[in-house]
Amino acid sequence: MIQRNDYRTIIKRVISSVLALTVAFSLAGCGEEKEEVKKEAPATVTVGFSQIGAESDWRLASTASMQSAFNESTGYKLMMDDGQQKQENQLKAMRKFVDSGVDYIVLDPITETGWDATLQEASEANIPVIIVDRRVDVENDDVYVAWIGSDFRLEGDRACAWLEAYLASIEYEDEVNIAHIQGTVGSSAQIGRTEALEEKADACGWNIIAQEDADFVQAKGKEVMERMLAEFGDTINVVYCENDSEALGAIEALKERGMRPGKHIQNGEVLVVSFDATRDGLLKTLSGEITVDTECNPNYGAPTIRLINSLQNGLPVEHDNYMEESQFSTVLTITEVRVDGKPYKVTHLNRDMLANRNY
Ligand code: AHR
């Protein structure tokens, strides 16, 4: 049976051939080489990309990475839609992509749930969907071809394992009172990083004295930190931020209140734990205001285009694909952390490493 997508491919090929012949005839009329007649313009592959928004430096970097991979020079046309941090906008964009008959859809889902119907529509229209960054929680995983993203739970586990190792290394035995600034509730990044903290806090007897969503946004990170400081003041000695943007906001709020973000918790400094490892996040790590920054890799362009190129050539692709990520600190005593018995290297950050960090 010929599917809707097959019809589109046939129509595209017919249009390309007609165009090629038209060009060829007019060239022939002008006395050009006959050989031109055989040339067929390659059809451009259209990719609809539903991006979450522009909430953080990390997000801007992921958009830039997709744009630099998918463009005319690589044979693609990227139709990007900015969801402005709203799932309803992303759902509309997905329908628009299906209606306009794009060749592929790339979706970075704001939250995990609520995608079944839309992904089913894309699947029935025979448009392959690739999920990037965060995950979707759907009844049937076959409604999308592949996922490329981060292991957010592992990121959280690495951050918490680092914190546990650090506190042990300085023989810190006082109360650990954590202000927990969450990312968008219901997103994979929040779920994984929050679960890791809650589990480790339980195991180590740490107190999570405040917990609030700041949507991965710097200004909200600052507001949330201000509210937590107003309520708990200097009893807070650890701030666990679920991304660098929130950490930058939280650090501002701490300093405005006269508190000192830094690694000497035993001398009244506040340990700031963060995720992403953006340039600004790593600068704060170098200055010691962020104690440990666990990387979240935003460079989706290259792996996504590789995957789509494979699909274009009829090659098999892996369903689940993980990004490579690291962890940075300037604390020299901890060179690795263990999660489920497996060692993960902690990179000792130095200024040279920032030379290629363009986000
Ligand atoms: O999904 C990845 C998270 O989303 C990044 O940690 C954060 O910065 C972004 O907004």
Image: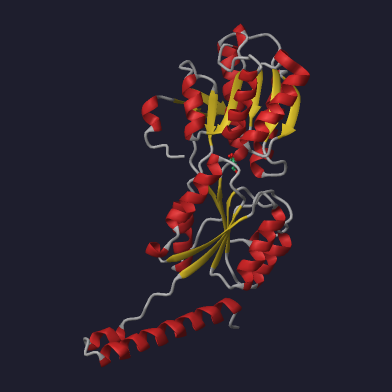
Q: Is residue 238 left or right of residue 69?
A: right
Tell me what residue is drawn at x 41 percent, y 66 percent: 75
Asked whether, in this view, residue 277 is left or right of residue 16, the answer is right
Taking depth in this image into account, of 229 and 296 the one nearest to the observer is 229
In the image, taking residue 243 as reference, residue 139 lies left or right, namely right
**Residue 71 seen anywhere in this rendered image of the structure:** yes
Where residue 138 sits, quadrant-wise, is bottom right
**Is residue 327 at all visible to an observer of this figure?**
no
Residue at coordinates 54% horizontally, 66% vertically from top-left? 104
Q: Nearer the viewer, residue 249 or 204?
A: 249
Does 224 sit above or below residue 124? above
Q: Residue furthest front?
A: 256
The residue sitting at 63% across, 14% down in the picture is 259
Instruction: Relative to 5, say whether 48 is above or below.
Output: above
Residue at (70%, 13%) from the top-left corner? 234
Where residue 54 appears, as percent x and y from the top left, is 58, 46
Residue 186: give x, y in percent of width and height. Answer: 72, 44
Q: Quadrant of residue 176?
A: top right
Q: Give the x, y percent position of residue 254.
A: 64, 20
49 relative to 9, above or below: above
Q: Position of residue 224 (x, y in %)?
A: 71, 29
Of 324 and 20, the residue lying toward us: 20
